Amino acid sequence: MAIGSILGAFGSFTGGYSASKTGDTLIQPGAPMDLQEIDFVKVLNLEERAIADHVELVYREKNQAIVMESRFLFEPDSLKLRPESEVFLDNLIFLIGPADYPVEIIGHVGEIPVEDGSHESAWDRSFQIAEAVFSYLKIRGNDLENRLHVYGAGTHRPRFSTLTRRSRAMNERVEIMLYPGKSLDTHRILKKDRPIFSRLIPLTSGYLIDGTKVKKNRENQAVVDSNGWLTTFADLVMLLLTFLSCCCPCLPWMPKAEGNISRFQGAPGVLELGNNQEISNLAEFVRLFQATDHLLVVDNALMEKLLVPVNESRPDQIDDVLDKIDTLFDIIEDPQGIAVSFHGELFFSPGKAELRKAMFPFLDTVASAIEECDNDIFIVGHTDDIPSGSGEAGSNRQLSLKRAEAVLHYFVNQHHIPSGRFAVGGYGADRPLVPNDTPEGRNKNRRVQIIFKIL
Protein backbone atom coordinates (compact mmCIF):
# COMPACT_ATOMS: atom_id res chain seq x y z
CA MET A 1 0.00 0.00 0.00
CA ALA A 2 1.16 3.50 -0.72
CA ILE A 3 1.03 4.44 2.96
CA GLY A 4 3.73 7.06 2.74
CA SER A 5 1.81 9.10 0.19
CA ILE A 6 -1.14 9.63 2.48
CA LEU A 7 1.10 11.41 4.93
CA GLY A 8 0.92 14.46 2.73
CA ALA A 9 -2.62 14.80 4.01
CA PHE A 10 -1.24 16.23 7.19
CA GLY A 11 0.58 19.08 5.49
CA SER A 12 -2.18 21.38 6.68
CA PHE A 13 -0.70 21.40 10.16
CA THR A 14 1.18 24.59 10.93
CA GLY A 15 4.65 24.23 9.50
CA GLY A 16 3.65 21.29 7.28
CA TYR A 17 4.71 17.67 7.29
CA SER A 18 6.94 16.05 4.73
CA ALA A 19 5.91 12.90 2.91
CA SER A 20 7.75 9.86 4.17
CA LYS A 21 7.97 6.14 3.64
CA THR A 22 6.03 3.62 5.63
CA GLY A 23 7.03 3.74 9.28
CA ASP A 24 9.19 6.84 8.93
CA THR A 25 8.88 9.59 11.49
CA LEU A 26 7.25 12.85 10.52
CA ILE A 27 8.99 15.95 11.82
CA GLN A 28 7.17 19.23 12.14
CA PRO A 29 9.55 22.09 13.03
CA GLY A 30 8.23 24.35 15.75
CA ALA A 31 5.34 22.08 16.67
CA PRO A 32 4.54 21.11 20.25
CA MET A 33 6.50 18.11 21.48
CA ASP A 34 3.52 15.79 21.23
CA LEU A 35 3.20 16.58 17.50
CA GLN A 36 6.85 16.80 16.53
CA GLU A 37 7.31 13.08 16.04
CA ILE A 38 4.44 11.04 14.65
CA ASP A 39 4.80 7.56 13.24
CA PHE A 40 1.69 7.15 11.11
CA VAL A 41 1.66 3.37 11.17
CA LYS A 42 2.16 3.19 14.93
CA VAL A 43 -0.43 5.85 15.75
CA LEU A 44 -3.10 3.90 13.85
CA ASN A 45 -1.72 0.56 15.12
CA LEU A 46 -1.46 -0.74 11.57
CA GLU A 47 1.28 -3.12 12.63
CA GLU A 48 -1.34 -5.18 14.42
CA ARG A 49 -2.63 -8.00 12.24
CA ALA A 50 -6.19 -7.60 13.55
CA ILE A 51 -6.28 -4.06 12.12
CA ALA A 52 -4.09 -4.48 9.06
CA ASP A 53 -6.33 -7.26 7.70
CA HIS A 54 -9.35 -4.94 7.60
CA VAL A 55 -7.97 -1.42 7.09
CA GLU A 56 -6.22 -0.10 4.01
CA LEU A 57 -4.61 3.25 3.22
CA VAL A 58 -5.01 4.24 -0.42
CA TYR A 59 -3.31 7.14 -2.17
CA ARG A 60 -5.13 8.74 -5.08
CA GLU A 61 -4.34 11.70 -7.30
CA LYS A 62 -6.54 14.19 -5.44
CA ASN A 63 -7.13 12.56 -2.09
CA GLN A 64 -6.10 9.90 0.36
CA ALA A 65 -8.51 7.28 1.62
CA ILE A 66 -8.71 5.22 4.77
CA VAL A 67 -10.80 2.16 3.90
CA MET A 68 -12.30 0.24 6.84
CA GLU A 69 -14.37 -2.92 6.52
CA SER A 70 -17.69 -2.91 8.36
CA ARG A 71 -16.85 -6.12 10.19
CA PHE A 72 -13.87 -4.32 11.72
CA LEU A 73 -15.97 -1.29 12.68
CA PHE A 74 -19.19 -2.80 14.03
CA GLU A 75 -20.46 -5.56 16.26
CA PRO A 76 -22.15 -8.40 14.31
CA ASP A 77 -25.58 -7.44 12.94
CA SER A 78 -25.35 -4.07 14.63
CA LEU A 79 -24.28 -0.47 14.11
CA LYS A 80 -22.58 -0.37 17.49
CA LEU A 81 -18.89 0.36 17.13
CA ARG A 82 -16.48 -2.27 18.44
CA PRO A 83 -14.08 -1.15 21.21
CA GLU A 84 -11.12 -1.78 18.90
CA SER A 85 -12.59 0.43 16.19
CA GLU A 86 -13.27 3.23 18.67
CA VAL A 87 -9.59 3.24 19.60
CA PHE A 88 -8.69 3.36 15.91
CA LEU A 89 -11.05 6.28 15.28
CA ASP A 90 -9.68 8.14 18.32
CA ASN A 91 -6.20 7.81 16.85
CA LEU A 92 -7.51 9.04 13.50
CA ILE A 93 -9.01 12.10 15.20
CA PHE A 94 -5.60 12.83 16.71
CA LEU A 95 -4.09 12.91 13.22
CA ILE A 96 -6.71 14.86 11.27
CA GLY A 97 -8.06 17.07 14.06
CA PRO A 98 -5.51 19.93 13.83
CA ALA A 99 -5.93 20.24 10.04
CA ASP A 100 -8.55 22.29 8.19
CA TYR A 101 -9.37 20.41 5.00
CA PRO A 102 -12.72 18.72 4.20
CA VAL A 103 -13.26 15.05 5.03
CA GLU A 104 -15.80 12.75 3.35
CA ILE A 105 -17.26 9.69 5.03
CA ILE A 106 -18.84 7.38 2.46
CA GLY A 107 -20.58 4.11 3.28
CA HIS A 108 -20.77 1.14 0.92
CA VAL A 109 -22.65 -2.16 1.18
CA GLY A 110 -21.85 -5.41 -0.52
CA GLU A 111 -25.32 -6.58 -1.44
CA ILE A 112 -28.95 -5.54 -1.28
CA PRO A 113 -29.90 -5.94 2.41
CA VAL A 114 -32.44 -8.46 3.60
CA GLU A 115 -35.86 -6.89 4.09
CA ASP A 116 -35.78 -7.05 7.88
CA GLY A 117 -37.41 -3.67 8.46
CA SER A 118 -34.26 -1.96 9.80
CA HIS A 119 -33.60 -0.23 6.47
CA GLU A 120 -35.51 0.14 3.25
CA SER A 121 -32.74 0.04 0.65
CA ALA A 122 -29.03 -0.38 0.09
CA TRP A 123 -28.79 3.41 -0.08
CA ASP A 124 -30.29 3.64 3.42
CA ARG A 125 -27.97 1.01 4.83
CA SER A 126 -24.83 2.48 3.29
CA PHE A 127 -25.72 5.89 4.71
CA GLN A 128 -26.41 4.40 8.14
CA ILE A 129 -22.96 2.83 8.48
CA ALA A 130 -21.30 6.05 7.34
CA GLU A 131 -23.47 8.05 9.73
CA ALA A 132 -22.43 5.84 12.66
CA VAL A 133 -18.77 6.70 12.04
CA PHE A 134 -19.69 10.35 11.45
CA SER A 135 -21.55 10.54 14.77
CA TYR A 136 -18.58 9.15 16.68
CA LEU A 137 -16.08 11.50 15.05
CA LYS A 138 -18.43 14.46 15.60
CA ILE A 139 -18.78 13.74 19.31
CA ARG A 140 -15.15 12.90 20.01
CA GLY A 141 -13.46 15.44 17.75
CA ASN A 142 -13.68 19.09 18.74
CA ASP A 143 -14.70 21.37 15.84
CA LEU A 144 -14.68 18.45 13.39
CA GLU A 145 -18.38 18.50 12.48
CA ASN A 146 -18.25 21.30 9.90
CA ARG A 147 -15.41 19.52 8.09
CA LEU A 148 -17.22 16.20 7.85
CA HIS A 149 -19.55 15.26 4.99
CA VAL A 150 -21.38 11.94 5.16
CA TYR A 151 -22.96 9.96 2.30
CA GLY A 152 -24.07 6.51 1.29
CA ALA A 153 -23.17 5.00 -2.10
CA GLY A 154 -25.28 1.85 -1.94
CA THR A 155 -23.96 -1.24 -3.70
CA HIS A 156 -22.73 0.58 -6.78
CA ARG A 157 -18.99 0.94 -6.10
CA PRO A 158 -17.74 -2.59 -5.30
CA ARG A 159 -14.01 -3.11 -4.86
CA PHE A 160 -14.18 -6.89 -5.24
CA SER A 161 -16.36 -9.52 -6.84
CA THR A 162 -19.89 -9.84 -5.51
CA LEU A 163 -20.08 -13.60 -6.17
CA THR A 164 -18.95 -14.85 -2.76
CA ARG A 165 -19.96 -14.05 0.79
CA ARG A 166 -16.38 -13.11 1.71
CA SER A 167 -15.98 -10.66 -1.17
CA ARG A 168 -19.36 -9.10 -0.42
CA ALA A 169 -18.30 -8.66 3.19
CA MET A 170 -15.12 -6.92 2.02
CA ASN A 171 -17.21 -4.59 -0.16
CA GLU A 172 -19.22 -3.48 2.88
CA ARG A 173 -17.02 -0.69 4.15
CA VAL A 174 -16.65 2.94 5.19
CA GLU A 175 -14.17 5.12 3.33
CA ILE A 176 -12.80 8.26 4.95
CA MET A 177 -11.54 10.55 2.20
CA LEU A 178 -9.02 13.28 3.05
CA TYR A 179 -8.49 16.31 0.80
CA PRO A 180 -5.40 18.10 2.13
CA GLY A 181 -5.13 20.49 -0.82
CA LYS A 182 -8.70 21.79 -0.50
CA SER A 183 -9.68 24.72 1.68
CA LEU A 184 -12.96 24.98 3.56
CA ASP A 185 -13.34 28.56 2.34
CA THR A 186 -16.22 28.84 -0.14
CA HIS A 187 -16.44 32.28 -1.66
CA ARG A 188 -15.84 31.98 -5.40
CA ILE A 189 -19.51 32.10 -6.45
CA LEU A 190 -21.17 35.36 -5.44
CA LYS A 191 -24.68 36.69 -5.91
CA LYS A 192 -24.88 40.37 -6.75
CA ASP A 193 -27.30 41.16 -3.96
CA ARG A 194 -25.21 39.62 -1.20
CA PRO A 195 -23.44 41.86 1.33
CA ILE A 196 -20.09 40.06 1.03
CA PHE A 197 -19.76 41.16 -2.56
CA SER A 198 -20.69 44.78 -1.84
CA ARG A 199 -17.44 45.03 0.10
CA LEU A 200 -15.47 44.12 -3.00
CA ILE A 201 -17.05 46.01 -5.89
CA PRO A 202 -19.77 48.72 -5.86
CA LEU A 203 -23.23 47.33 -6.47
CA THR A 204 -26.31 49.12 -7.76
CA SER A 205 -29.80 47.68 -7.51
CA GLY A 206 -28.42 44.15 -7.73
CA TYR A 207 -26.43 44.86 -10.90
CA LEU A 208 -22.70 45.39 -11.11
CA ILE A 209 -21.81 48.78 -12.54
CA ASP A 210 -18.07 49.17 -12.19
CA GLY A 211 -17.12 52.75 -11.37
CA THR A 212 -20.67 54.09 -11.75
CA LYS A 213 -22.23 56.26 -9.03
CA VAL A 214 -25.85 56.07 -10.16
CA LYS A 215 -28.42 53.38 -9.49
CA LYS A 216 -32.09 52.93 -10.28
CA ASN A 217 -34.88 52.53 -7.80
CA ARG A 218 -37.99 50.40 -8.20
CA GLU A 219 -39.65 53.06 -10.36
CA ASN A 220 -36.63 52.95 -12.69
CA GLN A 221 -35.66 56.50 -11.72
CA ALA A 222 -32.02 57.46 -11.34
CA VAL A 223 -31.02 58.30 -7.80
CA VAL A 224 -27.67 59.25 -6.31
CA ASP A 225 -25.70 56.46 -4.71
CA SER A 226 -24.64 57.74 -1.30
CA ASN A 227 -21.59 55.47 -1.34
CA GLY A 228 -20.37 56.61 -4.73
CA TRP A 229 -17.78 58.95 -3.20
CA LEU A 230 -15.78 55.87 -2.13
CA THR A 231 -14.85 55.17 -5.74
CA THR A 232 -13.47 58.68 -6.21
CA PHE A 233 -11.63 58.53 -2.90
CA ALA A 234 -10.05 55.17 -3.82
CA ASP A 235 -8.89 56.62 -7.16
CA LEU A 236 -7.34 59.60 -5.32
CA VAL A 237 -5.43 57.34 -2.92
CA MET A 238 -4.14 55.20 -5.79
CA LEU A 239 -2.95 58.27 -7.71
CA LEU A 240 -1.20 59.56 -4.59
CA LEU A 241 0.61 56.25 -4.06
CA THR A 242 1.64 56.18 -7.71
CA PHE A 243 3.03 59.73 -7.43
CA LEU A 244 5.02 58.87 -4.31
CA SER A 245 6.45 55.70 -5.83
CA CYS A 246 7.68 57.64 -8.88
CA CYS A 247 9.09 60.65 -7.03
CA CYS A 248 10.44 58.95 -3.91
CA PRO A 249 11.63 55.46 -4.86
CA CYS A 250 14.09 55.43 -1.97
CA LEU A 251 11.43 55.52 0.74
CA PRO A 252 12.00 52.58 3.12
CA TRP A 253 8.45 51.28 2.81
CA MET A 254 8.47 51.13 -1.02
CA PRO A 255 10.09 47.66 -1.47
CA LYS A 256 7.47 46.12 0.83
CA ALA A 257 4.67 47.97 -0.95
CA GLU A 258 5.94 46.79 -4.33
CA GLY A 259 5.91 43.21 -3.07
CA ASN A 260 2.34 43.57 -1.87
CA ILE A 261 1.29 45.08 -5.21
CA SER A 262 2.90 42.23 -7.14
CA ARG A 263 1.05 39.68 -5.03
CA PHE A 264 -2.20 41.56 -5.58
CA GLN A 265 -1.63 41.57 -9.33
CA GLY A 266 -1.27 37.80 -9.30
CA ALA A 267 -4.46 37.27 -7.32
CA PRO A 268 -7.61 35.89 -8.97
CA GLY A 269 -9.86 38.44 -10.62
CA VAL A 270 -13.61 38.77 -10.88
CA LEU A 271 -15.75 37.44 -13.72
CA GLU A 272 -19.25 38.83 -14.01
CA LEU A 273 -21.47 36.22 -15.63
CA GLY A 274 -24.60 37.93 -16.81
CA ASN A 275 -27.21 37.00 -19.37
CA ASN A 276 -24.99 38.31 -22.15
CA GLN A 277 -22.14 35.89 -21.47
CA GLU A 278 -21.32 32.74 -23.42
CA ILE A 279 -22.50 30.50 -20.59
CA SER A 280 -25.55 28.83 -22.04
CA ASN A 281 -26.14 25.95 -19.62
CA LEU A 282 -25.21 24.51 -16.24
CA ALA A 283 -22.59 22.13 -17.65
CA GLU A 284 -20.64 25.04 -19.14
CA PHE A 285 -20.80 26.85 -15.81
CA VAL A 286 -19.38 23.80 -14.00
CA ARG A 287 -16.55 23.52 -16.53
CA LEU A 288 -15.75 27.23 -16.21
CA PHE A 289 -15.62 26.92 -12.42
CA GLN A 290 -13.12 24.08 -12.70
CA ALA A 291 -10.98 25.89 -15.25
CA THR A 292 -10.50 29.23 -13.44
CA ASP A 293 -9.65 30.60 -10.01
CA HIS A 294 -11.64 33.79 -10.56
CA LEU A 295 -14.54 34.91 -8.44
CA LEU A 296 -17.72 34.24 -10.41
CA VAL A 297 -20.61 36.69 -10.08
CA VAL A 298 -24.07 35.42 -10.94
CA ASP A 299 -27.41 37.21 -11.15
CA ASN A 300 -31.02 36.10 -11.53
CA ALA A 301 -30.84 36.25 -15.32
CA LEU A 302 -28.01 33.71 -15.31
CA MET A 303 -29.79 31.57 -12.71
CA GLU A 304 -32.81 31.42 -14.99
CA LYS A 305 -30.67 30.46 -17.95
CA LEU A 306 -28.89 27.68 -16.03
CA LEU A 307 -31.81 26.13 -14.16
CA VAL A 308 -35.11 27.00 -15.83
CA PRO A 309 -36.08 24.72 -18.74
CA VAL A 310 -36.21 26.31 -22.18
CA ASN A 311 -39.54 25.32 -23.68
CA GLU A 312 -41.94 27.21 -25.91
CA SER A 313 -44.94 25.92 -23.98
CA ARG A 314 -43.71 26.03 -20.41
CA PRO A 315 -46.14 24.96 -17.69
CA ASP A 316 -47.71 27.72 -15.65
CA GLN A 317 -45.81 26.47 -12.60
CA ILE A 318 -42.49 27.34 -14.27
CA ASP A 319 -43.61 30.88 -14.99
CA ASP A 320 -44.69 31.20 -11.37
CA VAL A 321 -41.23 30.09 -10.26
CA LEU A 322 -39.56 32.87 -12.24
CA ASP A 323 -41.10 35.47 -9.95
CA LYS A 324 -39.47 33.81 -6.93
CA ILE A 325 -36.32 32.41 -8.51
CA ASP A 326 -33.98 34.12 -6.03
CA THR A 327 -35.65 32.43 -3.05
CA LEU A 328 -36.26 29.02 -4.63
CA PHE A 329 -32.96 28.34 -6.38
CA ASP A 330 -29.34 28.91 -5.53
CA ILE A 331 -25.92 28.08 -6.96
CA ILE A 332 -23.13 28.26 -4.40
CA GLU A 333 -19.65 26.94 -3.84
CA ASP A 334 -19.54 24.03 -1.43
CA PRO A 335 -16.32 22.66 0.15
CA GLN A 336 -16.77 19.75 -2.25
CA GLY A 337 -17.68 21.63 -5.44
CA ILE A 338 -20.68 23.43 -6.94
CA ALA A 339 -23.99 22.99 -5.12
CA VAL A 340 -27.28 23.58 -6.91
CA SER A 341 -29.92 24.08 -4.21
CA PHE A 342 -33.70 23.88 -4.48
CA HIS A 343 -35.34 25.51 -1.48
CA GLY A 344 -38.68 25.29 0.29
CA GLU A 345 -41.47 23.01 -0.85
CA LEU A 346 -40.56 23.40 -4.51
CA PHE A 347 -40.11 19.66 -5.05
CA PHE A 348 -42.04 18.06 -2.19
CA SER A 349 -45.23 18.51 -0.25
CA PRO A 350 -44.75 19.18 3.49
CA GLY A 351 -43.56 16.05 5.27
CA LYS A 352 -43.48 14.01 2.04
CA ALA A 353 -40.68 12.48 -0.01
CA GLU A 354 -42.52 12.10 -3.32
CA LEU A 355 -41.42 14.46 -6.09
CA ARG A 356 -43.98 16.85 -7.50
CA LYS A 357 -44.45 16.16 -11.22
CA ALA A 358 -44.57 19.86 -12.03
CA MET A 359 -40.92 20.11 -11.00
CA PHE A 360 -39.64 17.34 -13.29
CA PRO A 361 -38.55 19.87 -15.98
CA PHE A 362 -36.12 21.49 -13.52
CA LEU A 363 -34.58 18.12 -12.69
CA ASP A 364 -34.35 17.38 -16.41
CA THR A 365 -32.25 20.54 -16.82
CA VAL A 366 -29.86 19.47 -14.06
CA ALA A 367 -29.75 15.92 -15.43
CA SER A 368 -28.58 17.25 -18.79
CA ALA A 369 -25.65 18.95 -17.03
CA ILE A 370 -24.82 15.75 -15.12
CA GLU A 371 -24.78 13.81 -18.39
CA GLU A 372 -22.43 16.34 -20.02
CA CYS A 373 -20.00 16.50 -17.08
CA ASP A 374 -17.94 13.66 -15.65
CA ASN A 375 -18.11 14.86 -12.03
CA ASP A 376 -19.35 12.58 -9.28
CA ILE A 377 -22.64 13.81 -7.86
CA PHE A 378 -23.67 14.11 -4.21
CA ILE A 379 -27.36 14.64 -3.43
CA VAL A 380 -28.10 15.91 0.07
CA GLY A 381 -31.40 16.65 1.79
CA HIS A 382 -32.00 19.18 4.57
CA THR A 383 -35.07 20.13 6.63
CA ASP A 384 -36.04 22.87 9.05
CA ASP A 385 -36.28 22.23 12.79
CA ILE A 386 -40.01 21.46 12.89
CA PRO A 387 -40.49 17.70 13.55
CA SER A 388 -42.06 15.80 10.68
CA GLY A 389 -45.51 14.32 11.01
CA SER A 390 -44.38 11.02 12.55
CA GLY A 391 -42.88 12.84 15.54
CA GLU A 392 -40.25 10.10 15.91
CA ALA A 393 -36.70 10.90 16.97
CA GLY A 394 -34.52 11.45 13.95
CA SER A 395 -37.48 11.55 11.59
CA ASN A 396 -36.34 14.81 10.02
CA ARG A 397 -33.03 13.21 9.14
CA GLN A 398 -34.79 10.24 7.61
CA LEU A 399 -37.10 12.53 5.65
CA SER A 400 -34.16 14.50 4.29
CA LEU A 401 -32.44 11.27 3.21
CA LYS A 402 -35.58 9.93 1.49
CA ARG A 403 -35.96 13.19 -0.43
CA ALA A 404 -32.37 12.95 -1.62
CA GLU A 405 -33.02 9.37 -2.70
CA ALA A 406 -36.12 10.47 -4.61
CA VAL A 407 -34.04 12.90 -6.66
CA LEU A 408 -31.41 10.21 -7.19
CA HIS A 409 -33.98 7.69 -8.44
CA TYR A 410 -35.35 10.24 -10.90
CA PHE A 411 -31.89 10.75 -12.43
CA VAL A 412 -31.20 7.01 -12.57
CA ASN A 413 -34.61 5.78 -13.71
CA GLN A 414 -35.68 8.59 -16.04
CA HIS A 415 -32.28 9.61 -17.48
CA HIS A 416 -30.40 6.33 -17.06
CA ILE A 417 -27.39 7.98 -15.45
CA PRO A 418 -25.14 5.29 -13.89
CA SER A 419 -25.82 4.80 -10.19
CA GLY A 420 -22.11 4.58 -9.47
CA ARG A 421 -21.75 8.33 -10.03
CA PHE A 422 -24.01 9.16 -7.09
CA ALA A 423 -23.93 9.22 -3.33
CA VAL A 424 -26.75 10.45 -1.10
CA GLY A 425 -27.02 11.98 2.35
CA GLY A 426 -29.50 13.58 4.71
CA TYR A 427 -28.64 16.00 7.51
CA GLY A 428 -32.14 16.75 8.76
CA ALA A 429 -32.12 20.10 10.58
CA ASP A 430 -28.46 19.87 11.66
CA ARG A 431 -27.00 22.23 9.05
CA PRO A 432 -29.28 25.26 8.60
CA LEU A 433 -28.27 28.08 6.29
CA VAL A 434 -30.06 30.67 8.42
CA PRO A 435 -31.83 30.64 11.80
CA ASN A 436 -35.13 28.76 11.90
CA ASP A 437 -36.91 31.57 13.74
CA THR A 438 -39.00 32.88 10.81
CA PRO A 439 -41.13 31.25 8.07
CA GLU A 440 -38.72 32.64 5.47
CA GLY A 441 -35.73 31.16 7.28
CA ARG A 442 -37.35 27.73 7.60
CA ASN A 443 -38.28 27.85 3.93
CA LYS A 444 -34.66 28.52 2.98
CA ASN A 445 -33.38 25.70 5.19
CA ARG A 446 -35.72 23.13 3.62
CA ARG A 447 -33.66 22.23 0.60
CA VAL A 448 -32.13 19.56 -1.58
CA GLN A 449 -28.58 20.14 -2.78
CA ILE A 450 -27.16 18.55 -5.93
CA ILE A 451 -23.38 18.87 -5.64
CA PHE A 452 -21.06 18.56 -8.62
CA LYS A 453 -17.98 17.23 -6.90
CA ILE A 454 -14.84 19.28 -7.65
CA LEU A 455 -11.98 18.35 -5.32
Image (cartoon, rainbow, N blue to C red):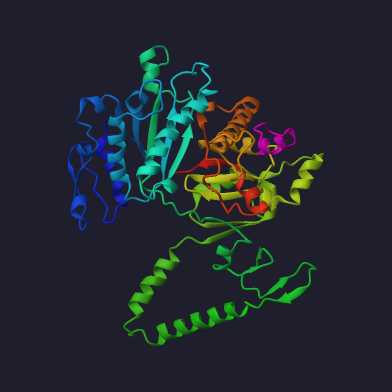
In x, y percent, where is residue 397?
54, 37
Is residue 275 among the parts visible in the rendering? no
Judge by depth and name the residue closer to the eye, 204 or 195. Answer: 195
Check the image and name the residue furthest to the top.
Answer: 164
Q: Is residue 292 left or right of residue 39?
A: right
Q: Residue at x 48, y 23 (%)?
A: 155
- 56 relative to 288, above or below: above
In x, y percent, where is residue 298?
62, 55
Residue 361: say if magenta: yes
Residue 341: say if magenta: no
Judge by depth and name the residue closer to the eye, 152 or 371. Answer: 152
In x, y percent, where is residue 200?
54, 67
- 406 relative to 12, above or below: above
In x, y percent, where is residue 75?
35, 24
Q: Give the total of numbered labels.
A: 0
The picture quadrant where one finds residue 167 is top left
Judge by depth and name the residue closer to the eye, 316 or 20. Answer: 316
- Quadrant location, the C terminus: top left
In this picture, which residue range is highlighted in magenta?
350-365
Is residue 319 among the parts visible in the rendering? yes
Q: Residue at x 70, y 49 (%)?
A: 304
- Quadrant location, the N terminus: top left
